[in-house]
Image (tube, rainbow, N blue to C red):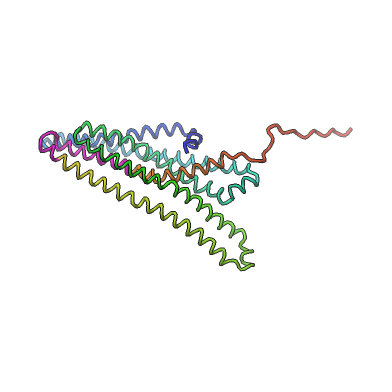
């Protein structure tokens, strides 16, 4: 998949740079807002300073407006990049297939070539779009959130040593089981397309020899096979979100419990506890949103491999590099 990105995202380097800058601005702004909120609580609410609350609150509104504009522009460029990438890859596959002889077509199968130029490209294109809108900003929020949490209160940040490895372990287990299942799903989509194409191509023969029930049984078998594999994938990810949500809720309870102790001892202000909780939620939310990418990445990885198989295949019959031109016939005297 990296090879596809390196080759087909090269024309969009300028838009990629703009998108990265906008995503960085958005992440920094999201990390700055909890700090402003803590200042309002500590210096405004606690001291009854209404002017300070209005002043800092106005700054928060300005930061929020900038974040909104940056997010809209970033999504616009992300959509342009992802759809352009998909268009270019589909065009490359089509041009490559045009050079194939019947040997290569039979090797892949017509149904598989159709799937690779439609469903497989869509999977990789979706990863490009979601990666630009979610995956790039998630590490910035995670790393920045950890730094800001340490800046707020170091002892309370010790909870992250337990929380983050636990979430990473859950993600690793899910991905190790999901990749083989996604590979099987793509193969079974090929089978569905093959059966459907054969039925449509030979519909007259099928009716003439009264083989309709047989073809229906073939399609039902392929369809049921795809259904069962897809169901196993969905069951796997159906367990992931509740587990991660449970970790999030238990982490919030732990922060409130130990944070209240530190507030009572005077080692942490109420505003600092509020900011720390917001940083924790940002970290956890970034991890949760990244999980959606981890759901897509295994399938896209399989699809990218199938696309590369087509693009890297050398036709067995091709035009010579130095063709001999036909000699010009001498003109009649």
Q: Residue 305 appears at what percent x and percent y?
A: 50, 42
Residue 54, visible in the rendered structure: no
Q: Residue at x 27, y 38 (%)?
A: 64
For this view, does 316 lie left or right of residue 156? right
The one of 4 and 165 positioned closer to us in this rendering: 165
Q: Position of residue 40 (x, y in %)?
A: 17, 36
> Does residue 108 show up?
yes
Q: Is residue 72 left or right of residue 155?
A: right
Q: Please determine whether, in this image, residue 119 is positioned above or below residue 329.
A: below
Q: Residue furthest bottom?
A: 210
Q: Where the C terminus falls, by quadrant?
A: top right
Q: Position of residue 195 (x, y in %)?
A: 56, 57
Q: Residue at x 62, y 43 (%)?
A: 98
In the displayed structure, 143 sits above or below 222; it is above
Specify start and end residues of the magenta stretch as a single range: 260-288
| Residue 279 belongs to magenta span | yes
Quadrant of residue 264 in the image?
top left
Counting labels gives 0
Residue occupying the point 61% across, 47% down: 105
Name which residue lies at 22% across and 38% down: 159
- Residue 286: x, y in percent? 31, 40
**Left or right, 318 with reference to 166:** right
Quick check: is 275 in the magenta stretch? yes
Decide if residue 218 is on the left or right side of residue 63.
right
Q: Residue furthest right?
A: 333
Query: Main SS of the magenta segment?
Result: helix
């Amino acid at each position: 998949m990296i090879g596809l990105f390196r080759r087909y995202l090269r024309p969009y380097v300028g838009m990629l740079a703009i998108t990265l800058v906008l995503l960085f601005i958005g992440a920094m702004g999201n990390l700055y807002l909890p700090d402003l909120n803590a200042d309002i609580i500590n210096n405004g609410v606690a001291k009854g300073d209404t002017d300070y609350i209005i002043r800092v609150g106005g700054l928060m509104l300005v930061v929020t407006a900038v974040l909104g504009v940056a997010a809209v522009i970033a999504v616009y460029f992300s959509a342009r990049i992802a759809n352009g990438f998909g268009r270019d890859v589909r065009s490359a596959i089509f041009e490559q297939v045009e050079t194939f002889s019947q040997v290569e077509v039979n090797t892949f199968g017509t149904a598989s070539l159709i799937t690779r130029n439609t469903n497989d490209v869509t999977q990789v294109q979706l990863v490009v779009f979601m990666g630009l809108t979610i995956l790039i900003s998630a590490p910035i929020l995670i790393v920045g959130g950890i730094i800001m949490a340490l800046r707020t209160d170091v002892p309370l940040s010790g909870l992250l040593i337990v929380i983050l490895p636990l979430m990473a372990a859950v993600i690793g287990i899910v991905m190790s089981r999901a990749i083989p299942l996604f590979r099987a799903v793509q193969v079974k989509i090929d089978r569905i397309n093959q059966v459907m194409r054969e039925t449509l191509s030979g519909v007259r023969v099928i009716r003439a020899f009264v083989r309709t029930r047989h073809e229906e049984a073939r399609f039902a078998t392929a369809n049921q096979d795809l259904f069962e594999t897809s169901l196993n994938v969905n069951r796997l990810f159906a367990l992931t979100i509740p587990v991660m949500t449970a970790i999030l809720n238990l982490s919030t309870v732990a922060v409130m419990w130990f944070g209240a102790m530190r507030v009572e001892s005077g080692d942490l202000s109420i505003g600092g506890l509020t900011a720390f909780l917001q940083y924790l939620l940002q970290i956890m939310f970034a991890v949760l949103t990244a999980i959606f990418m981890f759901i897509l990445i295994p399938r896209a990885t399989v699809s990218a491999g199938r696309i590369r198989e087509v693009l890297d295949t050398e036709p067995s019959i091709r035009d010579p590099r130095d063709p001999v031109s036909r000699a010009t016939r001498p003109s009649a005297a």
